[in-house]
Image (cartoon, rainbow, N blue to C red):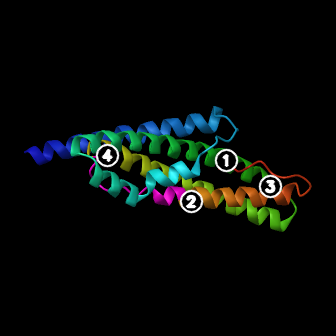
Amino acid sequence: MTLAIVLIIAATLGLVFLVRVTLLGTWQRSGGSHQLELIDLDAFRNLVDPSETAYLHRQLPAPEFRRVQRARLRAMASYIRAAGRNAAALMRSGESALVGEDAQTSQVARELVDNAVLLRRNVTFALFRIYVALAWPNAGLAADPILHDYERLNGSAMLLGRLQNPASRPHTSAAS
């Protein structure tokens, strides 16, 4: 009986989360900003580093670790949401570059769009895992794929910027 209640609550929370993400995604596509947000990749790397989490787990008393880990998870969610918004803006940029006559630019634009779509999908799953981990901060969490996807997306955006405007230095990277 208890298991059934837990499963019903988990399914309801999952449904609410998916509806929220879908509605936010629709809002961002229709009226979101086209500006990229600055993401401190070093801080993001520190947050997703399993050895850093293990170190904190060893050094802190259990209640203090849970408090610190929840704060880290909230910060991680903030970075991941920003990466998702940047992916949406870069996806729009890549889609507009797809119509060019230059085959190399079109290929790089396609790669940028593909990387942005992949990142947006992974952002949804990573946020879900983070919200679950907020309830159980001792559980392991792997948001590392988001960091790698975001770095690959930045590389594609920089290459597209160089191809579209070789005379000036592109300002597409939101990494510091």
Q: Point out the residue furthest to the right here.
A: 167
Q: Nearer the viewer, mark 1 or mark 3?
A: 1
Q: Are marks 3 and 4 in contact (CB under 8 Å)?
A: no
Residue type (three-letter) at the residue carrying disc 4: Val
Which mark identifies residue 132? 4
Say few, some or many: other residues with alpha carbon within 10 Å of mark 2 (under 14 / 14 to 19 / 20 or more): many
Instruction: Identify residue type, mark 2.
Output: Asp
Q: Which is nearer the N-term, disc 1 or disc 2? A: 2
Is residue 138 in the magenta section? yes
Disc 3/disc 2 C-alpha distance (Å): 18 Å
Which marked residue is nearer to the observer: mark 1 or mark 2? Answer: 1
Q: Of the two numbered discs 4 and 1 on the same chain, state the one appearing first in sequence.
A: 4
Alpha-carbon neighbours of circle 1 within 10 Å: few (<14), some, or many (≥20)? some
Amino acid type at circle 1 is Ala
User: Is 134 positioned to the left or the right of 4 in the image?
Assistant: right
Counting residues from the start of the chain, the first of labels 2 and 4 encountered is 4
Are discs 1 and 3 less than 8 Å apart at CB? Answer: no
Q: Marks 3/4: CA distance?
A: 38 Å
| SS at badge 1 | loop
Q: Which residue is mark 3?
A: 161
Observer-nearest residue: 155 or 60?
A: 60
Q: Is residue 67 above or below residue 121?
A: above
Is 37 situated left or right of 73 in this image?
right
Distance between the alpha carbons at the discs numbered 1 and 3: 13 Å
The part of the chain drawn in magenta is: 137-147
Q: Are marks 1 and 2 in contact (CB under 8 Å)?
A: no
Q: Position of residue 81 (x, y in %)?
A: 52, 42
The dot on residue 149 is: 2
Query: Quick check: marks 3 and 2 in contact, CB under 8 Å?
Result: no
Residue on which disc 1 sits: 174
Quadrant of residue 71 within the rendered picture: top left
